[in-house]
Image (cartoon, rainbow, N blue to C red):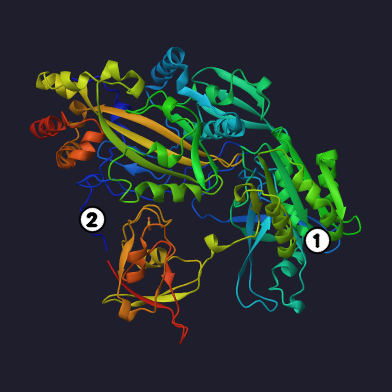
């Protein structure tokens, strides 16, 4: 049995192109379509799927309960407008029937008409004039996309995470990281420093030209269809890691999800900030196993993963069971 | 040349970006994509300076750009120019979804040793087609600055025009000093109309020398200084700022370093046991190999991901010009590998021959 909507399987960005997984600076140009045994993903920078309304409601509830998930340092005002305009444009490219961004007037004070038919929004605004928006630009647009957003300011040869809305973090805390440099944010990740993965990524991002858009993927396992596994809520989800070891096989396959993050990196033109988009996709092992090549590959990768990496991902206590579960559940 | 195990998914297919845009707004550009633009207006009202407006043939909006950005314009060979030139010119117009890109070019005389790019620009007419890169940013405003102090001389005013425009749009504190002669300077009227009393015009370098110490001493903490103009002018401005204790992190100059977009010189490559291929200027080794049907693993095409590494036979090669971010110093020094997406052959200093022998 499955409760996963068909488009969530068909559009699932399966994160294992190789038989083993190691950290790498796995960036590639955005928008390239990847075909998978179940369907395809990758043509859109901002993706809208069957979870759109549910995830936006969840984000609103999280923000209401914990306002620290939304932060904008004062100098990031331009970047927030920039991000809003860019995300509107990407929504319109992804789903022209549902979203539309239309220039109304150009010049020093350009204005635009924004239509979001899924949320019944039809609104005209003037770029840079907060009085013409119903909310702050970053707050408004992140109530209309499923992606988490972090905006990085570049100065003194370094990128700083100085604004963002992050409600679906996987084991980190945006509230804690606001204002930190890109290198500090990645401080605790094992292996990446000696291997130069993050310094290379940092150099690469600093060289992004206006409008250039790249992407990479990351992954972990999550227990339950839980998007918000942030450090702040660890007391709520942390015990699941022990609990899941005691459930029966059926429940295990439904509870444990492969979680893929598709991250897009965009150089915003007006502010020169780098926009980091993080979109999280969850697929239960029970559904993953229905796609035979995914089942076999995921079992191999999860079983082979070095212990320090499994530890950092927080999956060390149950990943071998996950690999074994996948091995034992070929699809018939 | 693929050495990785086959993926369980079908191979990644390179599909072009999904067309087409909502009316009016530009489609996303592919990596390294060039723009074919049409000259829609020329303005020669300032002696020696030609301002060009370049638009999409269909009149639609162009990609937005960061204040201080430049366009790299391709100048075809001809009229004494043996090779294609790539000239960088600062953008001076609107940054957000502009209907045209505007650049201003000072004519430099080929008879006096100039390469001929500016003379070519001065010969363009309305209706001509020009090939450019997308805007490139190397001189952006610092968002955290408490004040933006812009100091330009001569044609060096051009990147500061967009800084001024942006600072005014976003309510940033800004001051601009333009040095020109006899009250005539590129963009002078425009800058005055935009900036009003935030603009100071100085007649000649002597006036600047008299004005500079007081100007630089009297700025709030957190002011950033941006300067563009002749090299000796920028040197003088920066020296005055340093003498007053300005930290380097608050000093910014535009010097049009072109290293990042250098198309590179042509060279030849032999794939061990295979034929010898030409790699022309502007084509990467990776692209040249792909055109011959070789399947080289790759992701970023930017020298960062490490996927496209090839082995080099040092004895059979003239040397590697490494341009990637991936290899460490030891790997570079060994000269036995390279990243095919960005790196090229280094010519033999004695013969000038540039050649590589590579294998997967
Ligand atoms: S393709 Fe990424 S380093 Fe060459």
Q: Is residue B38 at least partly visible in the picture? A: yes
Quarter of the C terminus of chain A within the rendering: top left
Q: Farthest residue toward the bottom? A: B351
Instruction: Name the residue rendered at 83%, 64% in the picture.
Output: B48
Residue assigned mark 1 = B49
Query: Which residue, given by chain and number where applicable, does mark 2 sit on?
Result: B4
Report the quarter where the N terminus of chain A lies.
Answer: top left
| Secondary structure category for the residue under label 1 | strand
Q: Are marks 1 and 2 on the same chain?
A: yes
Q: Which residue is depicted at the point 35% across and 48% down?
A: A197
Secondary structure beneath disc 2? Answer: loop
Count neighbours of disc 1 (C-alpha within 10 A) and say few if under 14, some if 14 to 19, many if 20 or more.
Answer: many
Task: Name the quadrant where ligand 1 sits.
Answer: bottom left
- Residue B276 coordinates in the image, percent (x, y): 36, 78
Q: Is residue B53 visible?
A: no
Chain of the residue on which disc 2 is drawn: B
Label 2: how many residues lie within 10 Å, few (<14), some (14-19) or many (20+)?
A: few
Q: Whole-percent x and y of residue A124?
A: 65, 23
Question: Which of the pair A26/A30 is nearer the observer?
Answer: A26
Q: Where residue A100 appears, x then y in whole percent?
A: 56, 29
- Mark 1 to mark 2 CA distance (whole Å): 55 Å
Q: Is residue A200 left or right of residue A85?
A: left
As drawn, which residue projects farthest toward the right?
B182
Question: What chain does mark 1 sit on?
Answer: B
Q: Earlier in the sequence, mark 1 or mark 2?
A: 2
Q: Residue at x 37, y 39 (%)?
A: A186
User: Residue sitting at 34 percent across and 34 percent down?
Assistant: A261
Q: In the image, is residue B217 above or below residue B126?
A: above
- Judged left or right of residue B22, residue A174 is left
Q: Is residue A284 above or below residue B224?
A: above
């Amino acid at each position: 049995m499955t409760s996963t909507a068909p488009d969530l399987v068909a559009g699932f960005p399966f994160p294992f192109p190789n038989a083993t997984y190691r950290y790498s600076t796995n960036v590639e140009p955005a928008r390239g379509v990847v075909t998978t045994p179940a369907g395809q993903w990758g043509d859109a920078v901002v993706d809208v799927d069957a979870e759109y309304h549910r995830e936006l409601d969840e984000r609103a509830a999280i923000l209401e309960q914990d306002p620290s998930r939304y932060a904008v340092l004062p100098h990031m005002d331009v970047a927030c407008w920039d991000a809003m305009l860019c995300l509107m444009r990407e929504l319109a490219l992804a789903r022209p029937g549902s979203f539309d961004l239309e220039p109304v007037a150009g010049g020093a004070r350009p204005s635009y008409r924004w239509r979001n038919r899924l949320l019944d929004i039809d609104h005209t605004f003037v770029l840079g004039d907060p009085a013409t928006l119903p909310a702050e630009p970053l707050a408004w647009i992140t109530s209309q996309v499923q992606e988490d957003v972090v905006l990085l300011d570049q100065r003194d040869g370094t990128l700083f995470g100085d604004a963002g809305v992050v409600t679906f973090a996987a084991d980190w805390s945006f509230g804690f990281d606001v204002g930190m440099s890109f290198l500090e944010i990645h401080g605790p990740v094992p292996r990446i420093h000696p291997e130069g993965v993050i310094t290379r990524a940092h150099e690469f991002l600093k060289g992004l030209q206006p409008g250039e858009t790249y992407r990479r993927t990351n992954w972990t396992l999550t227990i339950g269809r839980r998007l918000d596994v942030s450090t702040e809520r660890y007391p709520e989800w942390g015990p699941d890691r022990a609990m899941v070891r005691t459930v029966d096989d059926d429940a295990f396959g439904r509870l444990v999800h492969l979680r893929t993050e598709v991250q897009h990196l965009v150089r915003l033109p007006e502010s020169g900030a780098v926009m980091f988009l993080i979109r999280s996709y969850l697929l239960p092992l029970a559904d993953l196993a229905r796609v035979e090549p995914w089942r076999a590959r995921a079992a191999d990768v999860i079983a082979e993963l070095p212990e320090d990496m499994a530890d950092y991902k927080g999956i060390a206590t149950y990943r071998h069971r996950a690999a074994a579960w996948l091995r034992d559940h070929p699809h018939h | 040349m693929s050495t990785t195990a086959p993926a369980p998914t079908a191979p990644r297919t390179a599909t072009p970006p999904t067309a087409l845009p909502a009316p009016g707004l530009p489609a996303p550009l592919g990596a390294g994509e060039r723009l074919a633009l049409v000259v829609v207006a020329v303005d020669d009202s300032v002696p020696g300076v030609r301002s060009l407006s370049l638009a999409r043939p269909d009149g639609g909006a162009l990609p937005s750009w960061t204040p201080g950005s430049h366009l790299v314009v391709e100048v075809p060979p001809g009229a004494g120019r043996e090779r294609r030139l790539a000239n960088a010119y600062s953008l001076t117009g609107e940054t957000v979804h502009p209907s045209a890109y505007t650049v201003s070019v000072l004519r430099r005389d080929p008879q006096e040793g100039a390469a001929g790019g500016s003379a070519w620009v001065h010969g363009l007419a309305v209706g001509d087609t020009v090939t450019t890169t997308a805007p490139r940013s190397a001189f952006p405003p610092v968002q955290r600055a408490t004040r933006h102090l812009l100091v330009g001389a001569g044609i060096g005013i051009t990147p500061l025009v967009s800084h001024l425009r942006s600072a005014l749009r976003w309510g940033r504190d800004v001051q601009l000093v333009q040095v020109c002669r006899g009250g005539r300077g590129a963009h002078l009227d425009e800058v005055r109309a935009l900036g009003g009393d935030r603009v100071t015009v100085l007649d000649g370098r002597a006036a600047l020398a008299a004005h500079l110490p007081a100007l630089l001493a009297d700025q709030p903490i957190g002011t950033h200084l941006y300067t563009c103009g002749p090299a000796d002018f920028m040197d003088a401005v920066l020296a005055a700022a340093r003498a007053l204790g300005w930290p380097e992190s608050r000093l910014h100059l535009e010097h049009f370093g072109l290293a990042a977009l250098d198309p590179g010189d042509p060279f030849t490559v032999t794939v061990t046991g295979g034929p010898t291929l030409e790699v022309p200027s502007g084509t990467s080794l990776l692209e040249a190999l792909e055109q011959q049907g070789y399947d080289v693993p790759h992701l970023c095409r930017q020298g960062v991901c490490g996927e496209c590494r090839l082995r080099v036979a040092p004895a059979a090669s003239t040397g590697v010009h490494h341009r990637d971010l991936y290899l460490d110093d030891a790997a570079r020094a060994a000269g036995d590998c390279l990243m095919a997406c960005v790196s090229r052959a280094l010519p033999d200093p004695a013969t000038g021959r540039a050649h590589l022998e590579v294998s997967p």
